């Protein structure tokens, strides 16, 4: 069953088209990954699906409710972990979750049980009663995640959920997402800058660039479209000759190295190497989602630096306005 | 459609946040006291029926001013909420925007009334003694005013794009509303040309209603004051629910 459907959904901010006549269908129970460079329109798309932004044109349904005319019903079906910090600084971690539980109509007993469970999941039990203003960036993020997961929504939007988390917390969150996925009751839409995360968690991935979906499929399908293996060689070779082989799908020169994308390296590597003259080094690896991403968008995501940087900027900004 | 749980949840958040920001509580009580004791005692005497003490005469006006400023500032505060993205969490929650709005307004009313009570206590002890029943009436009127002005602040805040608008609203909305209301002088002292402005300022009726309770006599019949204040509350509340219904994520 299709649980999220957009029809030519468009959002313009002045002259800038953030989302451009985008069509997308997401099946119930799947974990759908939205990948794309910064400013590609991921967050704008999610905001529209969450009823926080009105589309300029086109339409969308979430859980078969229209995001424009049935906002309250859409809101009842979803949960969201925002990219930007949205927990309240002056409240404690527990109070933030309390507020969330109350807004989502949980009774006191259910709330308490769920809050304890969530605090344990994100490892914030010890700090639960401290004001959020004393939390580190990573702790705020974890609280944010705890809050989004707390009411077990039918559809969960995760906008860069693990940005700025240490590896241990990240793994906790992944495990929880996987366990939710096993129950098959929650559909998840995830944006991320971490390719390994998308590869491991998502059933299907859409690559979005300039407000449009430019590639769509399972991680394996996407990789296969690009090629199976990458051979990176250093040395003097006749590239034109190599390009003539059918199994060579793409050749790219990167300084003194050359990268070739091949189908089935196990079978074809020998032929390829025999055709090269003199090589200083050879490296063979499988195509990763990162290669797929580069292939389609032409831009590399420098996830660590870029992600961390903007994340800290945001935290600093928030700290500055209220503290 | 209202969800009382949600109204309560939002109100509770507002109260907690307010009480934790001590600077806000303290700073907003300072200027009414300055008006009352520096301005009020500096001017000296008045010829208003029911009192000859100018300080007593402006007490109702200063109460209205205090409620106006606290409530409107409170409402404008959602610009910061938007910037902080906290508001998103509330906007995406499965509750009607009317509930969110009402929770917010009640939060503002509580803030303003806390200050009004402090001022009223100071006023009764030091300026003009009042019996409990009159204090109760005064508090009821002030609650109504604070409901309207907090709604007005939220409407302005919800429709404002940036913090820069803040100063404009203070200078072009709040101070004129205060001055034309006759808080500091009887509006009959105003020149004929300016008086119509006072009659369309809802705060004029707020000040007049309080003055009627304080001194037993006002510029308008009491029922007219109450009808105008109720209408003001209804209009701002309706505008508020509409503005909150349209409220989108700040970009």
Image: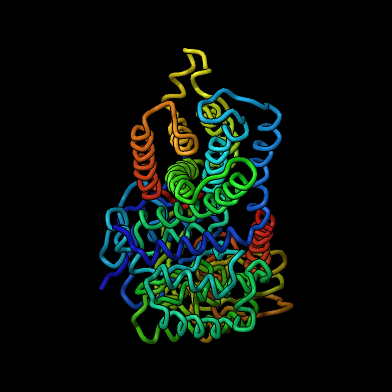
Q: Quadrant of residue A70?
A: bottom left
Name which residue lies at 60% across and 81% down. A124
Along the viewing direction, whichever of A157 and B175 lies nearer the viewer: B175
Along the viewing direction, whichever of A48 and B26 lies nearer the viewer: B26
Name the side, left or right, on which A130 lies relative to A98. Answer: right
A50 up-or-down from B29: above or below: below
**In this figure, what is the number of numbered marks?**
0
Q: Quadrant of residue B155?
A: top left
Q: Quadrant of residue A22?
A: bottom left
Q: Position of residue A273 (x, y in %)?
A: 62, 80
Name which residue lies at 50% across and 22% down. B187
A167 up-or-down from A20: above or below: below
Q: Position of residue B236 (x, y in %)?
A: 39, 41
Q: Residue furthest top?
A: B192
Res A284 seen here? yes
B93 up-or-down from B52: above or below: below
Along the viewing direction, whichever of A13 and A220 lies nearer the viewer: A13
Res A13 seen here? no
B64 up-or-down from A302: above or below: above
Q: Position of residue B190 (x, y in %)?
A: 52, 17
Q: Position of residue B32 (x, y in %)?
A: 63, 41
Q: How is the image coloured?
A: rainbow
Quadrant where the image shows the N terminus of chain B: bottom left
Name the side, left or right, on which B114 lies relative to A22. Answer: right
């Amino acid at each position: 069953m299709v649980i999220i459907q957009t029809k030519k959904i468009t959002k313009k901010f002045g002259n800038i088209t953030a989302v451009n006549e985008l069509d997308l269908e997401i099946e119930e129970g799947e974990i759908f990954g939205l990948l794309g460079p910064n400013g590609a329109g991921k967050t704008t798309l999610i905001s529209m699906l969450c009823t926080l932004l009105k589309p300029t044109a086109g339409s969308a349904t979430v859980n078969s409710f229209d995001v424009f005319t049935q906002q309250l019903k859409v809101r009842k079906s979803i949960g969201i972990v925002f990219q930007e910090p949205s927990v309240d600084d002056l409240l404690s971690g527990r109070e933030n979750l309390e507020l969330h539980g109350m807004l989502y109509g949980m009774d006191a007993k259910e709330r308490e049980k769920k809050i304890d469970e969530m605090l344990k999941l994100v490892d914030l039990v010890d700090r639960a009663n401290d004001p959020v203003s004393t939390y580190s960036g990573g702790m705020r993020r974890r609280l944010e995640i705890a809050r989004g997961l707390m009411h077990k929504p039918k559809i969960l939007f995760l906008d860069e959920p693990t940005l700025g988390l240490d590896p241990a917390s990240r793994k906790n969150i992944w495990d929880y997402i996987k366990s939710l996925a096993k129950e098959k009751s929650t559909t998840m839409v995830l944006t991320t800058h971490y390719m390994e995360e998308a590869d491991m968690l998502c059933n299907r991935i859409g690559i979005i660039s300039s407000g449009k979906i430019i590639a769509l499929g399972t991680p394996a399908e996407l990789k296969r479209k690009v090629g199976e293996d990458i051979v990176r060689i250093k040395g003097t070779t006749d590239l034109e000759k190599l390009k003539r082989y059918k199994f060579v799908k793409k050749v790219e020169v990167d300084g003194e190295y050359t990268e070739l994308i091949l189908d089935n390296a196990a079978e074809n590597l020998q032929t390829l190497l025999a055709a090269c003259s003199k090589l200083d080094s050879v490296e063979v690896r499988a195509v990763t989602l990162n290669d797929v991403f580069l292939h389609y968008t032409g831009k590399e995501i420098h996830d660590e630096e870029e992600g961390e940087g903007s994340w800290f900027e945001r935290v600093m900004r928030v700290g500055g306005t209220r503290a | 459609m209202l969800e009382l749980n949600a109204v309560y949840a939002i109100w509770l958040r507002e109260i907690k946040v307010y009480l934790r920001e001590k600077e806000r509580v303290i700073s907003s009580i300072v200027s009414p006291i300055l008006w009352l004791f520096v301005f009020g005692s500096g001017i000296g005497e008045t010829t208003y029926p029911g009192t000859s003490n100018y300080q007593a005469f402006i007490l109702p006006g200063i109460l209205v001013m205090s409620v106006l400023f606290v409530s409107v500032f409170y409402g404008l505060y959602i610009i910061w909420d938007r910037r902080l993205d906290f508001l998103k969490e509330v906007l995406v929650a499965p509750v009607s925007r009317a509930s969110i709005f009402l929770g917010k307004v009640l939060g503002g009313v509580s803030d303003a009334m806390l200050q009004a009570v402090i001022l009223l206590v100071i006023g009764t002890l030091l300026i003009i003694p009042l019996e409990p029943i009159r204090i109760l009436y005064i508090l009821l009127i002030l609650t109504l005013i604070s409901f309207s002005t907090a709604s007005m602040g939220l409407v302005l805040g919800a429709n404002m794009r940036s913090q820069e608008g803040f100063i404009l609203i203070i200078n072009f909305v709040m101070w004129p509303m205060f001055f034309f209301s006759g808080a500091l002088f009887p509006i009959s002292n105003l020149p004929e040309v300016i008086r119509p402005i006072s009659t369309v300022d809802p705060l004029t009726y707020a000040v007049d209603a309080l003055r009627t309770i304080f001194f037993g006599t006002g510029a308008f019949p009491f029922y007219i004051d109450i009808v105008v204040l109720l209408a003001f509350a209804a209009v701002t509340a309706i505008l508020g629910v509409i503005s909150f219904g349209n409220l989108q994520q700040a970009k």
